[in-house]
Image (tube, rainbow, N blue to C red):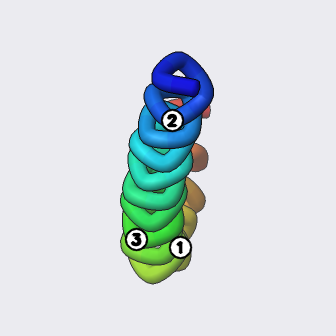
Amino acid sequence: MHTTLHLKNSLKAVALLACVALATLIVVSVQQASHAPLLLSQASMLLPAMG
């Protein structure tokens, strides 16, 4: 009985960590997406200068 309770608690902890990691990934990807047009325009400006 004690092991199943411990297992449920650790599963909750893992699920919580997964949610936090997922939220962090979403925030990072949204921030990168908002900067993406700027990076793309900078890259397209740099490409002719390099080539």
Residue under numbered circle 1: 33
* Residue ranking furthest to the front: 1
Q: Earlier in the sequence, mark 1 or mark 3?
A: 3
Q: Residues within 10 Å of mark 3 (few under 14, many from 20)?
A: few
Which residue is denoted by mark 3 in the rendering? 27
Quarter of the view holding residue 28: bottom left
Q: Position of residue 46 (x, y in %)?
A: 45, 49
- Position of residue 31 measured from the top left corner of the image (x, y, whole percent): 38, 73
- Taking depth in this image into account, of 9 and 23 the one nearest to the observer is 9
Q: Secondary structure at mark 3?
A: helix
| Residues at marks 1 and 2, CA–CA distance in whole angstroms | 42 Å
Q: Nearer the viewer, mark 1 or mark 2?
A: 2
Residue 5: assigned label: 2
User: What distance separates the C-alpha of mark 3 from that of mark 2?
Assistant: 33 Å
Residue depicted at 50% across the width and 59% down the height: 19
Residue 47, x across and y down, in percent: 57, 45
Q: Are marks 1 and 2 in contact (CB under 8 Å)?
A: no
